[in-house]
Image (cartoon, rainbow, N blue to C red):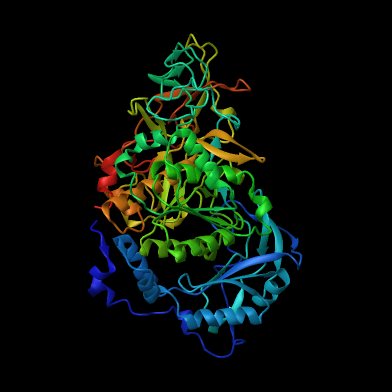
Amino acid sequence: MKRRNLAALTAAATTLAIIPTAAAFAASGGEDDWKVSLNNSGTSVATGSNQRVVVHGSASTTTKVSATLQLPLRNQAEADKLIAQGVTMTPAQYREKFAPTQAQVDKVSKWAKKNGLTVSEVSRDAGTVSVRSDVKAVNKAFGVTMQRATLGATTGLTVNADPKVPASLGLAGVAGLNTLHRMQTHNTKIGNQRTALAPKSASTKGKKGSTLTHMGGKAANAAGSQDCAAYWGKNVAPTAKKWGQESNYLCGYLPQDLVKMYGTDGAKAQKPAVGILLWGGDTNMKTITNDYMTEAGYPKLDSYTASIAAPDSHMPQCDPDGVKGEHALDVQSSHAIAPAAPIYYYGAASCFDDALTTSLAKMVNEHKVSTISMSFGSTTDAGMTAADKAAWDRPFQQAALTGISVFASTGDWGDNHTRNTGGAKGVGHPASSTNVTAVGGTSVGLAEDGSQPVVTGWENRFYKQPSLDSTAGIVDVTATQTPTSGAGGGVSASYTQPTWQKGVVTGTTSMRALPDVSAIGDPYTGFTIRYTSGGQVGYSAIGGTSLSSPAMAAIVGLSKAQNGKKIGLASPWIYKLKGTGAIKDVNAVNKAGVWAPSNDGAYNLVGFDAKPEGLASAAGWDNVTGVGTPSGASFLANFGK
């Protein structure tokens, strides 16, 4: 796919007439003219799911509600086509071609204020007017009754009818009238947080000046040792191995190890601005990170900017203390791979869609970053109306067209059947959107010499080995492990298959398939982070596709900077590399595993890529690793060509 920008499409650009949707041509009478029902914004919340909304009565009229009024973007079909073609343009060109007029936005704002809604944010580029008010004002403005409701285990609000608005406003939808969908972080810790790391007798070879050691690592190549391994195979507890490639679980890689893993040393001077979207956050993150980097003998994080919104009423439901670990993982893994890159962190007011999309639109509008990582998601698309999804896709498309690459984690619970009501399989949002690059997970066994004897898909199966001196009597205890431990993957029920997946994705489906690509995620081969928990700062090994997404975003950012490429959506360019030396195809089902202690004695072996569900790596594209994983310097050199 030949990269093109807007200037190279002069002939095509002349056809981009300003064509508002039919709704925008509605009668331009007074603000109290005839009204239209927005059937994409109200009662369609559970469409496409076996889960059903259960209503528990009218909501208190004083409950606070946030909503986003959406105007139609101009030339939507052309925007989709240009994204698929890899076309990018300046923010000003995007505004001219696709954004509603300022007069349209002002008209919506005026109507909202007249009807008792407080306007909190206006984005002409996204075509949105965000409002905050109480249920009483929302009921009156939109002709609905907001109700208390549940969808599976999620409690929130829904509406009894589709909202009605004056036709003259030309609105395309209203997002946020249902609060039955929220995001979760995608990280998994092995063991408890440590305030300090292991004794300095652990291996630190290759880490000049480092005072930080791998957690728990002891003598080199200790057969029979039950300590974690600093590198693959350094410690192996069983003398009788189940797999040809076996190790104790990894103590937690250090920043230098991620550089080895992805061959980014030659690009470490590049400075792509890396964006991270989450909610809340640790206001002491830069100090915590640089204390870690000093101990590790690694370059400090010089440029870090945080924009953290004041928490809203939903924040208590979003684990505001626990999210600090996610914040640390995103920042510290990004910095490890791209140590010279400035990092911009945007912490939303909560984990609910309206708060996150507001911060996302702000990040895209400010246009300071080259890539964006989102290490969170849902387990299903249920709980979202078409308007709710559009609230995400608008800034995603704007990012793609203006040269920002967006990545999202696919989740840590495999096909999500253990998390969804009724055991329904599903893929989560926002990774399911065709306007982002969905990142799955791998298990990576890095040897001390920098080689990688083990690269598999991250889908773990659990075993009990009664005697470490014998393989007799090994029992598969996967069924007792809930939920499944593995990267998310599968087929979307909401988004159709993009052009770059046609003929590549295996199986018979016309829908979007996940993931697109993969990076390190298995917590048994995790990354060491320093973070705050319960007011205490310490270290822990951590994994999950929450590690995979920022790693991939940083790698792509380095490549774009190194090659001088202005690229938006990364997915089409990644698929172009399938079958080349730039992408490593992952196909290693049940060929490796680790020994790991267990407090309850349920298991002590963890099989990699051992298909605990229907997800497993395979030749070509697969539902765990996508088209594969970046192959070092070759990926950096060839991405975008």
Is 100 or 270 nearer to us in this picture? 270
Task: Name the quadrant containing residue 230.
Answer: top left
Q: Residue furthest front?
A: 209
Residue at 54%, 71% in the rendered image: 173
- Of the 4 image quadrants, the one containing the N terminus is bottom left
Residue at 53% across / 81% down in the picture? Answer: 106
Residue 342 screen position, x and y as percent? 43, 52
Relative to 291, is 52 above or below? below
* For residue 410, side relative to residue 265 (left or right): right
Image coordinates of residue 433 in percent, x first then y, are: 45, 56
Q: Quadrant of residue 584?
A: top left
Q: Position of residue 169 (x, y in %)?
A: 54, 81
* Residue 154, above or below 398: above
Q: Tell me how many marks there are.
A: 0
Say whether residue 252 is left or right of residue 60. Answer: left
The residue furthest bottom is 29
Residue 618 versus residue 99 in the image, above or below? above
Q: Can the viewer see residue 459? A: no
- Of all residues, the one furthest to the top in this rendering is 469
Residue 515 in percent (x, y) is at 41, 46
Q: Tell me: 508 left or right of 32.
A: left
Of 231 and 495, which appears nearest the observer? 231
Front residue (pair 412, 131): 131
User: Can the viewer see residue 324 in this picture?
Assistant: yes
